[in-house]
Image (cartoon, rainbow, N blue to C red):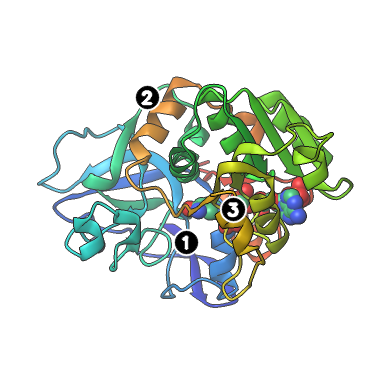
Amino acid sequence: MKAVRLEAVGSITLREVAEPVPGPDDLLVRIEACGVCGTDRHLFHGEFPCRPPVTPGHEFSGIVEAMGHSVSGFSLGDRVTGDPNIACGRCRHCHAGRVNLCSNLNAIGIHRDGGFADYVVLPQKQAFILPADLKPTHGAFCEPLGCCLHGVDLAEIKPGSSVAILGGGVIGLLTVQLARLAGATTIILSTRQASRRALAEELGATATVDASAADVIDAISGPAGLVPGGVDVVLECAGVQETVEQSLRLARAGGTVVIVGVVPQGMKAAFEPFDLLFRELKVLGSFLNPYTHRRAAELIASGAIEIDRLISRQVPLEEAAAVIANPPAAGEVKVVVVPDRG
Ligand code: NAP
Ligand code: ZN
């Protein structure tokens, strides 16, 4: 079969490899779609630990083509989505129910071979069935949506909440939709690209702010801003110092800030401890998708999340390595790799 191989940091190529053999508890999944994520680019640049050679791709879905003898509850031909993050189940964090913090996390597409290939091996405990009539590309959004669900769960958005989301990439645009579904009545997205602001307003944002033109703090929480005094919840989805610093200032007294964006390791952000104390802010990190993949799959199967407008391009496996090795094009939200079986 064909697989995109990260041979070493800075070296990625499509080549012929042996088709993987599923173990007793595994499904062999023929990939229908696999999304390209910022993490794939970080792997390529050596900015995220992994063990090359490896096939990247952790946002995949496909069809069950074979299975090990201990598998139950799945049939050949099922469309499935895979939660790529395999927790060990036996470390302190797993025993505390914090599987995203597992000391021995073994992620498909990072530590073991992933979805930029014709086939992937998926342990049955990581697999969830999707409807047979679901658009194949939609299944690839379960993993990013699961990460956003964890952030929105931690944020405890309630009906009537006011929410600010910083960063209008796919994570921000999925989070806008989840905030709407959670009942937020004010949903403000701050991002620089006009096309993303327009899309956010179609997807449920009640207002948007051009982060490159306006003073975001004035525009949102200033006396003449959209929510004077600040919003109930801020979700930082850009992963840059500026938005992390903004996020604490945009929350109202007693408000909640959730950091979803991955700020490069070692980078610092400034905040005023007095402000944190005096306004009793709650600041939380949200990492990965603990126990949210099934709900993400349910949401996507239900059609409640707009996916098509988040897909900027579909490319065949032959183009995946070049997409990963290059920065995203302007205006691009999500590129999905769809193996061509012509
Ligand atoms: P992305 O496409 O890079 O989106 C982030 C967007 O933020 C940028 O495209 C940019 O859009 C916007 N931005 C940059 N600087 C900004 C600023 N100063 N003010 C406002 N917006 C700004 O990435 P993504 O896939 O949506 O992911 C977002 C972040 O979440 C990344 O850091 C990613 O690593 C992280 N992530 C975290 C988890 C988790 O488990 N916590 C899971 C997946 C991803 P404009 O050009 O429009 O400004
Ligand atoms: Zn563990």
- Quadrant in which the N terminus appears: bottom left
**Residue under pointer 2:** 131
Q: Could you say whether the residue bearing mark 1 is in a helix, strand or loop?
A: loop
SS type, badge 3: helix
Quadrant of the image occupied by residue 77: top left
Residue type at tag 2: Pro
In x, y percent, where is residue 216? 79, 46
Residue 326: x percent and y percent?
A: 69, 63
Q: Is residue 123 above or below residue 342?
A: below
Q: Nearer the viewer, residue 18 or 126?
A: 126
Q: Nearer the viewer, residue 254 or 179?
A: 254
Residue 160 visible somewhere in the drawing: yes
Give 252 or 91, whichever is nearer the viewer.
252
| Residue type for callout 3 | Phe
For the residues bearing labels 3 and 2, Cβ distance under 8 angstroms: no
Quadrant hosting ligand 2: bottom left
Which residue does the image show at 29% across and 68% down from the upper left?
103
The numbered mark at residue 56 is: 1
